[in-house]
């Protein structure tokens, strides 16, 4: 949190489009708490994977099954370079989320697929996507209200 945003907000009631006023009542216990910045509470690992530009797209595409490199590259929306996709799948492979199989053909045929752990992460991606879709109107309204009160 930034120095100006230190208050913990409470969850919104269903159907409430704007944030409630900041309460002086004690906040509910957070779901995750890192006691110090050096603590390994899992958030950094999650953000490292989900926060990069192409990892989520790779996970989503591989959730449908085994893909060759060029097929994976074609399915990803946006212009992902061969080098960037290579780095992305290597990171996912290093983390144990993707497996890479090289078939001894000429030229070598390389296939990628999600591991069991990779498949388990797709549930998290789906939950975040569902949350985003469900809250899209409320977020748009909150942005509109903020922009009205904070002109550029």
Image (spheres, rainbow, N blue to C red):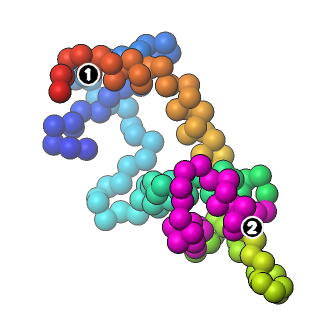
| Label located before the other in sequence (1 or 2) | 2
Where residue 37 sits, quadrant-wise, is bottom left
Residue located farthest toward the top when viewing the structure as drawn? 15
Q: Is residue 32 above or below residue 73?
A: above
Q: Residue at x 72, y 61 (%)?
A: 71
Separation of marks 1 and 2 at Cα, in angstroms? 45 Å
Query: Taking the image as drawn, is residue 59 in sight?
Result: no
Q: Secondary structure at mark 2?
A: strand
Q: Is residue 82 above or below residue 8?
A: below
> Is residue 68 shown in magenta?
yes
Q: Secondary structure at mark 1?
A: helix
Query: Taking the image as drawn, is residue 129 in sight?
Result: yes
Choose between 26 and 78: the one closer to the eye: 78
- Residue 69: give x, y in percent of width and height: 69, 68
Q: Residue at x 78, y 78 (%)?
A: 109
Q: Is residue 67 left or right of residue 23?
A: right
The mark total stands at 2
Where residue 51 sits, quadrant-wise, is bottom left
Q: Residue at x 20, y 44 (%)?
A: 2
Q: Residue at x 67, y 57 (%)?
A: 74
Q: Quadrant of the N terminus?
A: top left
Question: Can you identify the residue that label 1 sits on?
Answer: 147
- Residue 50 circle label: none
Q: Nearer the viewer, mark 1 or mark 2?
A: 2
Q: Is residue 138 left or right of residue 9?
A: right
Give, as a single range, the part of the protein colored magenta: 66-92
Choose between 139 and 53: the one closer to the eye: 53
Question: Can you identify the residue that label 2 sits on?
Answer: 68
Where residue 134 sits, quadrant-wise, is top right
Magenta: predominant secondary structure element? helix
């Amino acid at each position: 949190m930034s120095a100006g945003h230190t208050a913990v907000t409470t969850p919104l009631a269903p159907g409430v489009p704007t944030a409630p006023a900041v309460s002086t009542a004690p906040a509910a216990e957070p779901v995750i708490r890192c006691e110090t910045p050096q603590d390994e509470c899992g958030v950094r690992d999650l953000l490292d994977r989900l926060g990069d530009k192409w990892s989520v797209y790779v996970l989503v595409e591989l959730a449908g099954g085994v893909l060759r490199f060029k097929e994976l590259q074609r399915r990803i929306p946006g212009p992902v370079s061969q080098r960037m996709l290579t780095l992305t799948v290597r990171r996912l492979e290093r983390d144990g989320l993707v497996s890479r199989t090289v078939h001894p053909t000429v030229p070598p045929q390389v296939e990628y697929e999600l591991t069991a752990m990779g498949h388990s992460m797709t549930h998290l991606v789906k939950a975040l996507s569902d949350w985003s879709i469900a809250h899209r109107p409320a977020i748009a309204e909150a942005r509109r209200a903020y922009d009205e009160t904070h002109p550029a």
